[in-house]
Amino acid sequence: MHGTAKMVCVHRLQDPIEANLIRGLLMNEDIPAELTGESLVGAYSGIPKLCDVRVLVPEQHRGPAEAIIRRYERGRAIADRDWRCSRCGEANDPSFEICWSCERARG
Ligand SMILES: [Zn+2]
């Protein structure tokens, strides 16, 4: 590995699909991210299987990479929350854009 930048781990997670998503976000920002534990993705066949995936970036990209991951996790925490319909008060799944009960648009 001589001549290449030192890779540092900026994130650890157990979902290889999410790991690939984070890698994509980093690549979009011109950060050449790599995953380790990726060989386990092939074993991921619909059966919930925990594994250990690490997101690695060259050391000089560490700060920006960590900021991107923090932003991603904050957004996900908000997106994972149910929202409450302003008309009928029903709780709605975060993936719904309209109320399941009265079909009022979200927001
Ligand atoms: Zn409603």
Image (cartoon, rainbow, N blue to C red):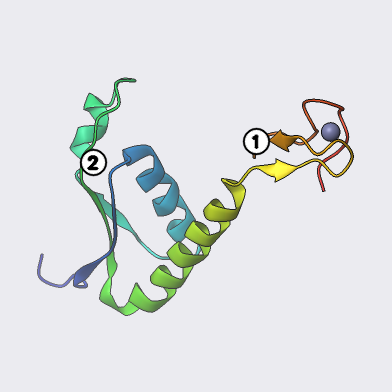
Compared to residue 56, the image places residue 16 above or below, namely above
- The residue under the point 64% across, 40% down is 94
Q: Tell me the quadrant of the picture where the N terminus can be found.
A: bottom left
Asked which secondary structure carries label 2, the reply is helix
Quadrant holding ligand 1? top right
Nearer-the-camera pick, 95 or 29: 95
Compared to residue 78, the image places residue 71 above or below, namely below
The answer to whether mark 1 and mark 2 are in CB contact below 8 A is no
Residue on which disc 1 sits? 95
Residue 26 coordinates in the image, percent (x, y): 44, 60
**Foreground tag (1 vs 2):** 1
Residue 7 coordinates in the image, percent (x, y): 21, 68
Compared to residue 92, the image places residue 19 above or below, namely below
Could you give the CA–CA distance between mark 1 and mark 2, rounded to whole angstroms? Answer: 28 Å
Q: Is residue 94 left or right of residue 12?
A: right
* Residue found at the far top of this picture: 46
Which of the labelled discs sits on residue 38, or is there none?
2
Q: Is residue 85 left or right of residue 52?
A: right
Q: Amino acid at mark 2?
A: Glu
- How many marks the image carries: the answer is 2
Mark found first going from the N terminus, 1 or 2: 2
Distance from mark 2 CB to nearest ligand 1 atom below 8 Å: no
Asked which secondary structure carries label 1, the reply is loop
Residue 72 coordinates in the image, percent (x, y): 51, 58
Question: Would you identify the image quadrant in which residue 8 lies?
Answer: bottom left
Dot 2 surroundings within 10 Å: few (below 14), some, or many (20 or more)? some
Q: Amino acid at mark 1?
A: Ser
